[in-house]
Every structure is written in structure tokens, then in C-alpha cells.
Amino acid sequence: MARRKINIQRNLGARTAAPDKPPDAIDQLTSSMATVDIGFEPTEQRVYKVNLDRIFPDSNQPRHLMPSDLRKRLIDKTATPAELVRELLDRATKDDPVALLVLGGKGDEVTTEDDENVEERGLFALANSICEVGLRQPLNVYQIDDPNQPTQTRYRIGEGERRFWAHHILVHQGQDAFKSVRCIIESLPESSEIIYQRQAAENAARVDLPAIARARSMQRIKEQLIVEHNKTSDEKALSQRALQTAIGQQVKIFTGRAVGDRMVRNYLTLLKLSSESQDLAEAGELTEKQLRPIVRLKTDFEQQMMIKEIIAKKWSSRQVAQQVTPSKPTPPVTLQEVAKTTVEQRFEQRIINAAKTVSSLMSLPTENYDMVVNTLASRAKDEKTHEALQALHDALRAILLKADDLVKRQYLELSITVIIPPLTELTQYLPSNKQSVIQSDKLSGAEILAQLIDWHEADVVFSSRMHPFFKELETTADALRAGETLPRPLAQQTDNDEKRYLLKSGGYLYWAHLLLVQRGQMQFKTIMVELETVSSADQF
């Protein structure tokens, strides 16, 4: 029976039955297979199980799954892949953001995810999928010789690094069945450029490839183009624009989609980010548009803080741009900017000019405006002008006399706790999402200042926006400590609460008093104000 099976395997597809003997069932089956078009043919590739500790990632792969410092240890051969996985899991338990993003969860637990979403969920979900349904796509590896260990064959990953690390996670969890992984083994090409082209083609074709990985792939294409140009041409070096155009054409070969030189330049600019920022951006799978404004931030700390904000709050590229470069408020339109095409607009202009004139006159001492108006009246050549100037004189005097009767000022020393926090100095710098917090009626001035300081220390973007406020605040506080004479704030008692006061001026002085009290200088708990009281019986 065994010999018959061997003969069937050797002669698969051949008719072996003798003419004078009717074929049995097995012969009929093999005979039919010989005439069926099965649509494929065997190749030289074979799938083998390879020990996991014999396989190593390609250090030149544009996509980096491990953080840069762990990759360096692997390249320098100061740590094994198994040791790096343990370190990555340990970082995740300490809430390291890159480790959590790479793994797709916290701690050691494997999350349960659908296989289609594995790419989005991290290595934990991929490991869980492999554990449940097996490895459906083997790794592509190249057989290499290690001069340090000539008796042991090693393998370098061509494609499948995520599956490689997922196996290591399963082994770390005690599942020894995954100490070997199914691989398609190929001979190492004579030219390393063949490997690079394969990786570039694979990466370029991936829609979900993080922008940082795509930028590294373009950078390697750029370096190869420079090498080829230097070998084949005696002309001067290619310009940056020519290089960027050539890179875009190379990407088009792999994807069928052309990439303009400007877009190539945008991608390559991302590589100016620090390795830590690149790790965060790649682990968070941020797009080029999301990262483009980040490059404009001055320090690496600012860049990392912003990247964390983007990932945590899932900001779109437009929201990122608004945070990095907040739009300036549109200045109010003045009448000078409006075309005077209607009677109403011309009348409004005359009213404004008159208001400016009256305001200017009222700012003068009484004897001065008296002299100016009387002099003009004496020079008037017609009765109407004379009457108009006299009417203006009488109106100004009436206004000033009425104001003197209405407003009575006194100086009063108030506790800073009874003053309603002035927000005018803050709202011009605060982003809208923080204005709503500050404007809450439940917060005292001390609580508002403490919140501002917390944001100032934790959020570098906020700190940059609020720099003018804090600079003026510190200057005023220094002046107070030095005993300098400063203008007294103008305060007004509220109608609905006799113990509360509004500041009509001197907001920075109020915040400076609060700041000094928070720093333990309790002599600044009170503030001297000029109290304005309005007589309700004499109001207009």
C-alpha cells in the first residue's frame, strides 16, 4: 500500500492503468487531476519554521516600531529582541506614551480586537490575533552569514517586523509554541539596493504608513539618487528641487500616484524633528499635515508637548495649525476703511470727528478750553459760527459741571479678596477653550492665578501665548516689592453686593498683589484703590 502511494505521488497526473485493466478509483482521481487547469504552479519558495532567536529586524527599515533608544541597543548588539520586548512592556506599565501607542494598551494584557483592525490597535491585538487564528502571512526573511557565529545561520527580516515582535510578546507571556515563526526564506541579494527597493515599494504602497516612516523612505530614495547621479554624471550636483521632483517620480513608480516636489519637501522637513519627537509621531501614526506646523515650534520640548496633545485630543491638521499659530482677532473696521457712499456714513463720520474734538477739549483745563473757544468766537466772521462756538462752550461747561457733581472719589484700602478678578488683561491671550474655565463665577482671583501658573508650567504652547501677560505681571510685582510709586487702580462698588468691587483700571496691579501673596509676602493682601462712587439721584 505504501509503495502504491509513492507511485501515485511520483506519477501525479499520469495515466498508470494498463489498457486491459479497468482503472480503480485512485487512478481515476489522478487521471482527472492531470487534465484540470488548477491556475498555479509550484515555485522555489518554501515556508519553514525558524527559531525566533535567529531572526533580527533590518536596521535600515524606514518604519521604526521600537523607540529610537531601544533600536540603537539592538543595532549595537547590546540587547536581544527578547530583552527589548521586556523593556517595552515595563515602560508601558509606567505609562510611557510611546510604549503604550506601540503596544496598543496598558501593562501585559492582550486586547481582543478584530483582525481587520489589528494595524490600528498595536502589537497586543496582533499578538492576540496570531494566538487565536495563527499566522496567516509568513515573514519574508533573508538568510545571512554571521562571521561571529559561522556555525549558526541567521536571518534578517525583509517584510513582517510587526509579526516578529508580536511573536516575542507571546513568548514573553509564556506561550512557548511561538518560539518559532513561519518564514519564507530567500537568499540575500547581491545588491542591497534590491532590498531597499522592495521596502520602498511596500512602504510607498501602504495608505496607513505614518508620515515619519514615509519621510525616511523618501530620504533613502534621495540618498540613492545622489549616489547614482555622482556615478553616472560629471555635471554639478542636482538642485534640491530637481531631487525632490525625482523622488516624487520614484514614489509614483511604486504607487501610481505622483507626489509633487513641494510635498516631498514637506515630508523631508519632518526629519528635522528630534528622535524622541519622531518616535511619538510615528507611534501615534500622525499625518504629514498634522506634523507640518510642529516643525515651526522652537524647542524639542514644545514639539513633544504638542504631539502629545494631538494624540490625546485627536486634533485635525486644521486644529493643530490653529493651536501652533493662533489666528489673530480681526480688528474692528474703522470708518476710514468704509467707503463714504451714503449720507448716513458721512453723518457718522461727522459725529465721530465731533466726539474726538469734544474729548480733546475736555481733557484741557477749564481755563484753556475757555480761552480757545472764546478766541475762535471773537474771530468768527458770521453770526452762525459765533453762535455755534458759544453753544459748544456752554455744552462743555455743562458736561464738566455735571461730571463733577456725579463723581466723587476717595481713597480706600481694600482686601484683594473683595475685588472681582479683572479678566481684561487675560482674555486677549487666552485660547477660547481656557477662557471658559477662567470666566467661571466659582473661581476666586487666587484660584485663577494658580490655574494660569499650572498651565504655564505644563503647556509650552500656552506658556508662549501668555508670555506678555506673565512678563508684565513680574515687572509690576518687582516694582511693588521695590516700593515704587504706582498709579492707584480705579475701583467701583457693585450695586448688587456692597462688599464687592470692580476695577476699572489697574488690573496688572491686582494680579501682582495676588502673585506676591501666593509667594508668602502677606503684606500685599490689601491694595490701595481710588474709589469712585456715583450718586444715583444725579445720573443723566
Image (spheres, grey):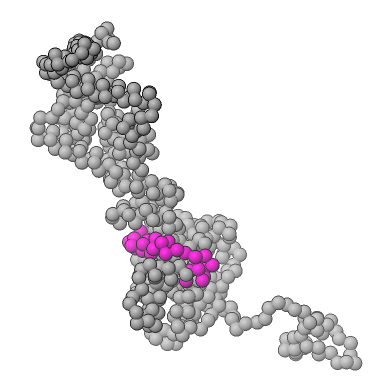
Is residue 172 depicted above or below 189 in this figure? above
The residue sitting at 72% across, 89% down in the picture is 10
Residue 409 or residue 367, whichever sits in front: 367
Quarter in which the C terminus is drawn: top left
Position in image of residue 337 (x %, y %): 33, 34
- Residue name at image x 30 percent, y 56 percent: 300
Viewer can see residue 332: no
Left or right placement of residue 59 versus residue 369 in this view: right
Q: Residue 492 in magenta?
A: no
Considering only vertical position in the picture, is 500 above or below 240? above
x, y percentage for residue 508?
21, 32
Q: Identify the residue at horizontal 77%, vertical 79% (top origin).
A: 36
Instruction: Determine whether, in the image, residue 3 is placed left or right of residue 431.
Output: right
* Main secondary-structure element of the magenta-colored stretch: helix
User: Looking at the image, can residue 486 be seen?
Assistant: yes
- Against 103, residue 27 (above or below) is below
Q: Which is more toward the observer, 288 or 175?
A: 288
For image coordinates 21% across by 17% down, the residue present is 532
Quadrant position of residue 409: top left
Q: Which residues are the magenta region?
A: 250-277
13 lies left or right of 213: right
Where residue 530 sits: x, y (%)?
A: 17, 21
Q: Is residue 266 magenta?
A: yes
x and y percent of residue 227 in the render? 37, 78
